[in-house]
Amino acid sequence: MPSTNEFPSKGWLKCSDISEGMFPNEYAVESITADNAEFSLFAHKTLVNEKEKLLKVTILDCRDDVCLVILPNEAYGVFKNMITVKIKDISQ
């Protein structure tokens, strides 16, 4: 959960699954939006913590129980890279 009101900031999004990507330097990442829509994307390995199932994101704002974040790439399922996620799924 973000502990600062200074945005934008970097944070980690909890993922439901992380697996090998199509290329050796990437992972396939799956997660869920604040509206419970599933999405997936390919992310460079430097942006993923495979062991803890986390994806590095940019947090633009958090209000109530949701955060607006920028994903490292456009996500399949939502077809954009700016989404809202539940604040409980974000850590810094």
Image (spheres, helix red, strand yellow):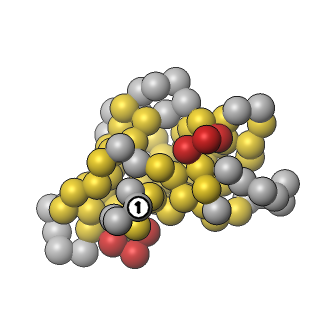
Could you tell whether 81 is left or right of 3 in the image? left
**Residue depicted at 64% across the width and 41% down the height:** 87
Horizontal and vertical percent position of residue 67:
66, 41
90 is higher (above) or lower (below) than 20: above
48 is higher (above) or lower (below) than 31: below
Crowd around label 1: few <14 · some 14–19 · many ≥20 (10 Å)? few
For the C terminus, the quadrant is bottom right
Residue 46 appears in the picture as rendered: yes
Check the image and name the residue furthest to the top.
35
Check the image and name the residue furthest to the right.
5
Could you tell whether 86 is left or right of 75 in the image? right
Type of amino acid at the residue the image marks with label 1? Glu
**Residue depicted at 59% across the width and 50% down the height:** 90
53 is higher (above) or lower (below) than 51: above
User: How many numbered tags mark residues here?
Assistant: 1
Horizontal and vertical percent position of residue 34:
55, 30
Look at mark 1 in the image and give the residue it sits on.
Answer: 52
Viewer-proximal residue among 23 and 17: 17
Residue 21 sits in quarter: bottom left
Residue 39 sits in quarter: top left
Horizontal and vertical percent position of residue 22:
15, 62
Q: Secondary structure at mark 1?
A: loop
**Residue depicted at 50% across the width and 62% down the height:** 56
Could you tell whether 47 is left or right of 57 in the image? left
Residue 58 appears in the picture as rendered: no
Horizontal and vertical percent position of residue 79:
39, 37
**Residue depicted at 17% across the width and 74% down the height:** 24
Viewer-proximal residue among 16 and 76: 16
